[in-house]
Amino acid sequence: MSEPEYEVVWPLAKSTYEIVSPTQRTLDLTGKTVCQLWNYCFKGDQMFSALRERLAERYPGIKFVDYDVFGTIHGPRGADVLEGGKVLQEQGCDLVIAGVGA
């Protein structure tokens, strides 16, 4: 009985994403609108509550768009939630804080 013969394939697929450079960091959050995104894992509700409280003390006029406005960003539908950034623009987001607990 002869040994089976297998074809070898390359296990890596063609890249489907584009590498982009991050934008410049926002140093002053005064008067900015911060959108909160969460995957609904590991105590994000507590963390975002603490962040909102501390940031509001430090930066007058800061506004928040809560994570429940966007829904979960967990799993394969996460990108659909944001519709390629359209939803963030509609909410007037200047920056995003994303919580992805394990």
Image (cartoon, helix red, strand yellow):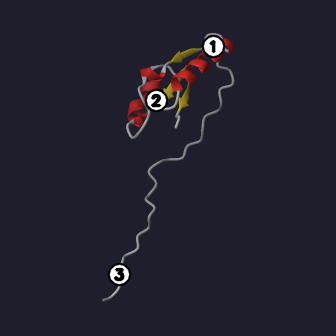
Q: Is 6 or 101 nearer to us in this picture?
A: 101
Amino acid beneath label 1: Ala
Residue located beneath label 1 in the image: 56
Question: Would you say 16 lies left or right of 46 here?
Answer: left
Which amino acid does the dot numbered 3 rest on?
Glu
* SS under mark 1: helix
Nearer the viewer's eye, disc 1 or disc 3?
3
Report x, y in % for residue 32.
Answer: 59, 17
The percent position of residue 17, horizontal first and vertical second, equals: 47, 48
Q: Residue furthest left?
A: 1
Q: CA distance from mark 1 to mark 3?
A: 66 Å
How many marks the image carries: the answer is 3
Viewport quadrant of the N terminus: bottom left
Q: Looking at the picture, does residue 21 appear above or below residue 67?
A: below
Vertical relation: 63 (above or below) 99: above
Q: CA distance from mark 3 to mark 2?
A: 47 Å
Q: Earlier in the sequence, mark 1 or mark 3?
A: 3
* Gap between marks 1 and 2 measured at Cα: 23 Å
The residue where tag 2 is placed is 40
Q: Residue at x 65, y 26 (%)?
A: 26
| Residue at (35, 85) in percent of width and height | 3
